[in-house]
C-alpha cells in the first residue's frame, strides 16, 4: 500500500515504484539540498573511513563547500508508530566514528529518551521529516504575511502667500495667496511651485493642514525683468493626506513536508515548488532540475 511519503515523492520528484524507505531517503537528499544549495548531496553511497577496511552504506551524504568542511552523513528511518531506540542510534554511531563525520538521524516517528540522551552524548543530531498535515501543522507556521502600508503625501496644489508691500505690483500676479498653477518666474530661473516644494521639504507623517514660513536673504525677485517685486518672505500652506494599501504575501507553492531538527535550529515547511526544483541522477546526485523543451508540434521529423 502506497503511503503519503511515496505519494509526495511520486507527484513532486518522479513517479516510480521504489522499495519501502527509498522514497523517504531520496526526498531527504533533496531537502538537505534545499537547506544548503551550495552543498553536494548524494543518495545511497558506500563510504570507508581513512585507513579503515570496513565500508558503510550511507542513506544521504552531504559535502559542504571547501576542502576543510566535514561531510555530513544522514541515516533515514521511515517507520510507523514505533520510536527510534537506543540500539538504532548506537549502531549508526559505529559508522559515524569510523567515518569521522558529522551525523543526523532523520525519521518519520520519534526517539526514545535513551536514544536522545545517547545521541546528545555522541554529537549526533536528531531530526524528523513528516508529511504536512493541515489539521496538525497549520497553526505552527506562518501561512501568509498581511502588509498594511500607510503613506503620507502633500496635496499637489499648495498655496503661497507672498509677504510684500501692499502697494507692490507684480504684472499678472495678484498679491496675497497665489495658486501655483500660474506660478510667476523667480529671478528668471525657478517658479513659485519649485520654491514651495523646497520649503515644504520633508512633510509630517500625519494627516492635517500645515503652514511654514520661509524668509529670504537676499529677498526673492518675482515677475518679469523690469517689473519684478521684491519678496522678503513667503508662507506656504499645504494639506497632508494619508494613502493606505493592504496586500498579502503568500508562499509560492503548497506545503508538502515538515522538517525539524530537534535542537530547534531548523523548523520549516518544505513546499512542492522547492521539491520540484531538484532531481536525482542515476548515481544519486542531487542537482537543479533541467526543464526540457518539447519540439514544436508542426516541426518535421528529420
Image (tube, rainbow, N blue to C red):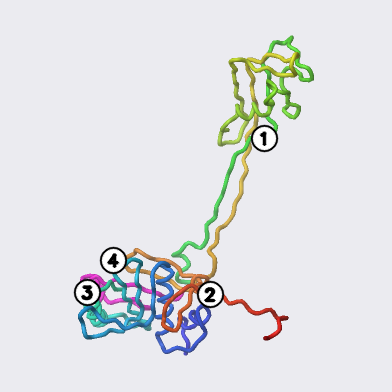
Query: At 44% from the left edge and 69% from the top edge, which residue is drawn?
Result: 34
- The label nearer to you, 4 versus 1, is 4
- Indicate left or right for 283 with 206 as reference: left
Q: Quick one: label 2 or label 3, which is nearer the N terminus? A: 3
Quarter of image, res 82: bottom left
Q: Quick one: label 1 or label 3, which is nearer the N terminus? A: 3
Q: Secondary structure at mark 2?
A: loop
Quarter holding the C terminus? bottom right
Query: At 47% from the left edge and 83% from the top edge, which residue is drawn?
Result: 6
Examine the rendered structure and indicate whether residue 66 appears above or below residue 228. Answer: below
Q: Quick one: label 4 or label 1, which is nearer the N terminus? A: 4
Report if the CB atoms under discs 2 and 4 are less than 8 Å apart. Answer: no
Residue at image mark 1: 155
Residue at image mark 3: 118
Q: Residues within 10 Å of mark 1 (few under 14, many from 20)?
A: few
Look at the image and give the residue range highlighted in magenta. 105-133
Residue at image mark 2: 290
Q: Is residue 131 magenta?
A: yes
- Indicate left or right for 129 with 192 as reference: left
**Distance in Å between CA atoms under marks 4 and 1:** 61 Å
- The label nearer to you, 1 versus 2, is 2
- The label nearer to you, 2 versus 3, is 2
Query: At 73% from the left edge and 81% from the top edge, which residue is drawn?
Result: 298
Residue at image mark 4: 68
Amino acid at each position: 500500500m502506497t503511503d503519503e511519503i511515496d505519494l509526495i515523492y511520486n507527484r513532486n520528484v518522479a513517479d516510480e515504484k521504489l522499495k519501502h524507505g527509498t522514497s523517504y531517503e531520496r526526498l531527504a537528499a533533496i531537502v538537505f539540498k534545499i537547506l544548503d544549495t551550495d552543498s553536494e548531496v548524494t543518495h545511497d553511497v558506500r563510504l570507508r573511513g581513512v585507513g579503515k577496511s570496513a565500508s558503510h552504506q550511507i542513506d544521504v551524504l552531504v559535502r559542504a563547500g571547501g576542502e576543510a568542511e566535514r561531510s555530513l552523513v544522514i541515516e533515514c528511518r521511515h517507520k510507523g508508530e514505533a520510536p527510534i531506540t537506543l540500539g538504532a542510534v548506537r549502531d549508526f554511531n559505529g559508522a559515524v566514528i569510523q567515518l569521522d563525520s558529522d551525523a543526523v538521524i532523520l525519521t518519520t516517528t520519534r526517539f526514545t529518551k535513551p536514544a536522545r540522551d545517547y545521541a546528545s552524548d555522541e554529537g549526533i543530531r536528531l531530526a524528523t521529516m513528516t508529511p504536512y498535515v493541515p489539521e496538525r501543522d497549520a497553526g505552527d507556521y506562518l501561512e501568509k504575511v498581511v502588509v498594511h502600508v500607510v503613506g503620507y503625501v502633500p496635496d499637489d496644489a499648495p498655496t503661497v502667500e507672498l509677504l510684500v508691500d501692499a502697494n507692490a505690483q507684480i504684472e499678472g500676479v495678484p498679491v496675497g495667496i497665489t495658486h501655483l498653477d500660474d506660478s510667476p518666474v523667480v529671478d528668471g530661473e525657478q517658479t513659485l511651485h519649485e520654491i514651495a516644494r523646497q520649503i515644504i521639504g520633508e512633510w509630517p507623517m500625519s494627516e492635517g493642514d500645515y503652514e511654514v514660513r520661509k524668509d529670504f536673504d537676499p529677498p526673492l525677485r518675482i515677475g518679469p525683468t523690469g517689473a519684478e517685486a521684491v519678496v522678503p518672505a513667503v508662507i506656504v500652506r499645504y494639506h497632508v493626506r494619508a494613502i493606505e494599501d493592504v496586500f498579502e504575501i503568500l508562499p509560492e507553492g503548497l506545503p508538502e513536508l515538515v522538517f525539524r531538527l530537534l535542537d530547534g535550529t531548523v523548523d520549516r515547511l518544505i513546499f512542492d515548488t522547492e521539491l520540484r526544483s531538484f532531481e536525482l541522477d542515476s548515481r544519486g546526485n542531487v542537482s537543479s532540475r533541467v526543464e526540457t523543451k518539447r519540439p514544436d508540434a508542426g516541426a518535421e521529423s528529420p
